[in-house]
Image (spheres, coloured by chain):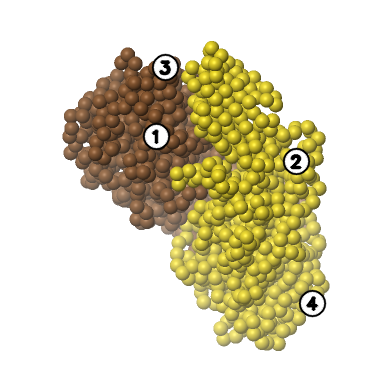
Chain colours: A yellow, B brown
Amino acid sequence: MGIIFDKEKEVIEPKPNNTDTSEDVEDSGRGHNNIDNNMRGSTPVDPWGSGLGESDVKPVGKRIRTVAMRLGEKSEEIIVLGTELAVKLYSLAPSHSTSFSIEKTDNVTLRFNKGESDSNEIPGSGMSGSMFSRDAVVYISIATVSNMWNDSQVKFEFKAANGEVAGESLLLLTSIALSLDADINRNGSVEETFEVDKSRWTWGPNGQGAIILVNCDNESVRADGERDTEDLWRNGKDDLLDMSMLVINFRGPNLEESGLPRDYRLRLHTSVETSTKVGIYSLEGTPFWDSKRQVIGKKRKQVEISFQKLNLLRDGQVRFAVEGIQYPDYDFDGIVPIHLSLFQVEDDVQLPIFKDTVTFRVSPWIMTPNNLKPKEVFVCEMRSQKSRNFVENLRELTKEVGVNLTVVKPGHNRGDRWMQDEIEFGYSEAPHKYMPVVLDSPRDRGLTNYPIFSLLGKDFGYVTRETYLEEPNSLDSFGNLEVSPPVKVNGVSFPFGKILIGGTLPGAFNERRMLKVIRNFLSAQKVQPLVELFSDWLTVGHIDEFMTFVPTNDKKSFKLLMASPDCCYSILKKLNREGHGELVLFEGKKSDADGLVNAERTVKDLLRDTDLDKYNKTKQRYLDWNRDTLKRELGLTEEDVIDVPALFHTVDGTGADAIFPGMVNMLVLGNHLGIPKPFGPKIQGICQFESYMRDQLEPLGVHCHFINDWESYHVLLGEIHCGTNTRREPFAYKWWNMEF
Amino acid sequence: MGIIFDKEKEVIEPKPNNTDTSEDVEDSGRGHNNIDNNMRGSTPVDPWGSGLGESDVKPVGKRIRTVAMRLGEKSEEIIVLGTELAVKLYSLAPSHSTSFSIEKTDNVTLRFNKGESDSNEIPGSGMSGSMFSRDAVVYISIATVSNMWNDSQVKFEFKAANGEVAGESLLLLTSIALSLDADINRNGSVEETFEVDKSRWTWGPNGQGAIILVNCDNESVRADGERDTEDLWRNGKDDLLDMSMLVINFRGPNLEESGLPRDYRLRLHTSVETSTKVGIYSLEGTPFWDSKRQVIGKKRKQVEISFQKLNLLRDGQVRFAVEGIQYPDYDFDGIVPIHLSLFQVEDDVQLPIFKDTVTFRVSPWIMTPNNLKPKEVFVCEMRSQKSRNFVENLRELTKEVGVNLTVVKPGHNRGDRWMQDEIEFGYSEAPHKYMPVVLDSPRDRGLTNYPIFSLLGKDFGYVTRETYLEEPNSLDSFGNLEVSPPVKVNGVSFPFGKILIGGTLPGAFNERRMLKVIRNFLSAQKVQPLVELFSDWLTVGHIDEFMTFVPTNDKKSFKLLMASPDCCYSILKKLNREGHGELVLFEGKKSDADGLVNAERTVKDLLRDTDLDKYNKTKQRYLDWNRDTLKRELGLTEEDVIDVPALFHTVDGTGADAIFPGMVNMLVLGNHLGIPKPFGPKIQGICQFESYMRDQLEPLGVHCHFINDWESYHVLLGEIHCGTNTRREPFAYKWWNMEF
């Protein structure tokens, strides 16, 4: 059995666990020694049992604590289940003794270190020996919890050569069960553990270590636009479900009884650094703490647990909920260790006699590539009939595909139609919880408030990166942030693909790049390595202007589509050669004063434009540089790439813009593509660019839907992809199963 | 053959390499294709050959660059040896062509990607085919360097179904050899490489990646106390020998000839971050640069290499020397990538058509444990006869052991006798160079200027960590910084041991700890993990007050010695029981007004002191906590620890001090120990504490020398170890062979 949060009540309840092995443990007849199985199993009716027998979490052996004893004296010690006390026999024994005997209560197990002494273990009673070496040590362990103080004993007796008793010492023992537990085997529930190194966090299907989410959604009833990470309170049961369980398991007599020789203190604590990365809440409420307020967080790095109150709790469990406060970043690797220490107080020094550490890792923020199933498409409707027409066309497509369409009306989009650029949808995940999380671009135009006021909410998280050191530029818009499908490169798998951003060329300086704070954030997520492409040659400078990924039904399951002037010229020359030189491109379109709209033009006329040819030859070189880089970084072959006809020109003499709607700048919804209508030359009413696209893609099981975006996006230097955004299903694969 | 720095001249020379395999390569008959062997071997008389055949540096395959061609046009391209040019045949071919043929000069190798085309490779001439699929690509490589521009050609011809020529294109090729090379196989010399991923740096005996030293010694004739890292100049040939070689290997025609269709630029460059971690100097001098000034460093992150001048150089090699500027730290992992890029310039865009990256790692700073051979002992002489006596005793010991003794006279030590506390000796190492480096403590007392003015010098480095955020305390003295011998813990080897420092207990706050800047520095060195012990209970608070390591002749080869009141009481009680209760400890010593000196006292009297007994029982618990921690962290058994008699008392009611000279606070010189004379109870003139020590250590091949330090150190709360320091031989094991 394990424990999980109850989804209905603001409490936690035991959860049946099908793989409970506690009975098997009893069957094995290990009796008091069954803690060797790394789980509590001291009583057959133990309701907590174990989920650990099935995991690969390895025991690290008992922790040893040396206890100080003196001849002729009585000592009292606490022993924690799963640990050993060490008594240095040679230090305790009188110098003229030649033999010793040790008696013990039944529940005590003794172990004698090797060395030169001939010792005998006498099961059930004790051990004795005739002499002992310099380094003789007796190790003491107990497998059951004491019912009362000092109910276990070990008695040491030393005899001189003449048979007289040379000295004796008595060790009175109180055994307690104490552990700090979390979902270290990642099965969604918490098990009590012994002798396991819970401080290690390891990757992979055989890895171990608990996981927390950054609690960046908003379940506060008080504040709009404020994330749950920003307050020091927990906001009802829904907020609790975002968090991970942390449990102190304690059984044993009250350690605060009066008359005890020493004081004991039990504390949950973190380092100063960690305390800024985490919020911990108690689920116990009074008599412990104000249960809604952080017990550990940026204002408190430790909390004391009262034994008096501990003994009042059901099963001696103190239950906490843990939230992440920050995503991994350049200065934070996502690792969050939490410690539980039992201190023995003497002379104002609090000596830790037992320490248990649980290490959490903060879930990364994960991007969703085009091959994941779409759940919701977002688009802005502007105050124009053309925009409304576009939205209607999009509605038809989403209806056909069966995806929800969310239309952001003029009042909310505040004149900003670039839905792709303001946000990037992603998610975080823990074994107990999936949370979609939107990354908000530092690009702050009309849509700037949309993510925080309209997307952030219950179970919908929000994260952003901003800086006062640099000014955002066009490359910080998230049309410039994409992610590949899963790839394998030189034998190494990237099950979440690689993140792609646009920037400048290696070795170039003082050019436009994405802000360092964003690049740092993306890199630090680790599960999707970052690849920087060359997009600065474009006026807008976004990689979605020249590339996309389309899911296909062939073996590789996707194609990389790349804009290609070479491909476009090849089609046009073929048409010309075949006698179609008088066909018209961009039919009915007219130049405007700014030259942004491209007028109707014949194939022949366009092919005669040597300046255009030369200009596009250069752009093809930049595209080929990106193409070579993508093939190398994603392990793609030539067969994995489809060239898409495109032509570029420049208006201001610096940056390049698409002459006709960039078809790669498409909306990908499963095997349905919403492609900007290219207005290419028509034969018998069929656009030859469209027909090229259908020829390439339809054999791969992909359906092409050409949508007119000329007036609503193209003339403003964007296309359908720039004007939409898509929330997708998460990967089925779990990020913690990656191997590094 | 490889190249190394010439130790005599300020230049570099080719060095014969015994493992030269270039002849073998020729024997294999690979001819022009022998670059597959990842080395230059294009001519039988090639003087550079390879040292790489013997290493585990794996080829990563040829990098591919797509080149843009147009039908009916002549293109000119540069091809770098070890790379391939890709021509998209389907993009180049006229649409009505049905077959193609390719002719080429002899030195060109063609490869056709798979796909549906039936193509034939025709050795020596070219290839042809009858049709080609959408993704047909021809890959072109050349294995020899061009003697002149455009001396290689590939001609593409396309034919229509009727047999007429449908179109043709000509590709004129100039092949060059270009690589950035360093000692990536760590054999002390630099080899030219092809098709190897030199950007990877990996640990282990089969690892790859070059190494640099932090150039923190001082070979400047101008400045005293200034490290070579602090200037932007190189300081003569000695300074050069501290650096690592970086070589641009270039062969081919001049790329700056007039009349070429494009401009080319060759640049060595780093990121902004890396440029602050490294200094790069040219060894070529004029006509290149001022050879003494950094060409890359914190003021310059790139440098242009002129082809005109390149062709003037012997063998087309531009040689650089690289120095590290910073040790690894919390914000720097020691990894330093340097790039060489060849840019093709067109329309003001510099497109990198070839990039080679060499990654260096900065050598960590490594501490030297007691089991390493001592080279030099340092001690301060004070203005007193007792100090002079102590120094004389020490001189005898070092003479016997055969180690140099350096005595810092009163004028230089400025009244500060604590030689251990001001500095820690360590070293850094690269395959070509070993450099001792002193770590200077932020503790700034009388000896503060000693390390920078008296130790720092030619081939003797200096590093320190300071902060304005925290005030140093006694725990920042380096009596509180030690390192264990090599250990194995739970199957994991630590061939350089672990670093040990003293601090406070886990879970305690606002107590004394070593400064975070020092802890960060030590952790970041990585090869010696950091373990924090509990030393704050002592007035001075240094771990050398209660522990040391002694090399022994048994299997484990060392013992951990730990101060133990239990052990002391055990000896005293034995004496008392055997009728020696009237023996005198601390004979002739008197209390002074401050109570710092402990008066003569009998065994019986001391045993009657119940307050002292109680006090030491508590201290034994702290020591046992450290003992348990050390055993766990260093993988030690009880047999690996020797208890050393010690007693503690408190004068001010807070911190603990040793009552009699702390014997663990010793000077370890091989198997000779300089131990503080304990002034214990004597039987027949033999001190029983000394005799206990001899009994424990002499069977292990260790010689004990007891030296009186009572007045010169003990009464001032230190002992021999505190008052001395030892420079030792480095480990034979190389740090880059560690595996992580």
The amino acid type of the residue labelled 3 equals: Glu
Mark 2 closeness class: few <14, some 14–19, many ≥20 residues within 10 Å: some
Measure the C-alpha gap from mark 2 to mark 4.
Answer: 64 Å
Give the numbered dot on residue B612. 1
- Give the residue displayed 62% in from the left and 70% down from the top: A423
Please give the count of numbered marks on the rendered protein: 4
> Which quadrant of the rendered structure holds the C terminus of chain B?
top right
Select label 2 or label 4 by which is in front: 2
Measure the C-alpha gap from mark 1 to mark 4.
Answer: 90 Å
The amino acid type of the residue labelled 2 equals: Thr
Measure the C-alpha gap from mark 3 to mark 4.
Answer: 104 Å
Q: Earlier in the sequence, mark 3 or mark 1?
A: 3
Q: Is residue B721 above or below residue B214?
A: above
Residue at mark 1: chain: B
- Give the residue displayed 75% in from the left and 75% down from the top: A405
Q: Earlier in the sequence, mark 2 or mark 4?
A: 2
In this rendering, do the residues under marks 3 and 1 share a single chain?
yes
Give the numbered dot on residue A396. 4
Mark 4 closeness class: few <14, some 14–19, many ≥20 residues within 10 Å: few
Tell me the SS state at disc 4: helix
Apparent side of residue A510 relative to residue A693 in the rendered image (left or right)? left
Tell me the SS state at disc 1: helix
Q: Is residue A720 above or below residue A207?
A: below
Give the numbered dot on residue A43. 2
Measure the C-alpha gap from mark 2 to mark 3.
Answer: 51 Å
Residue at mark 2: chain: A
In this rendering, do the residues under marks 2 and 3 share a single chain?
no
The amino acid type of the residue labelled 1 equals: Leu
Measure the C-alpha gap from mark 3 to mark 1.
Answer: 22 Å
- Which residue is label 3 attached to? B578
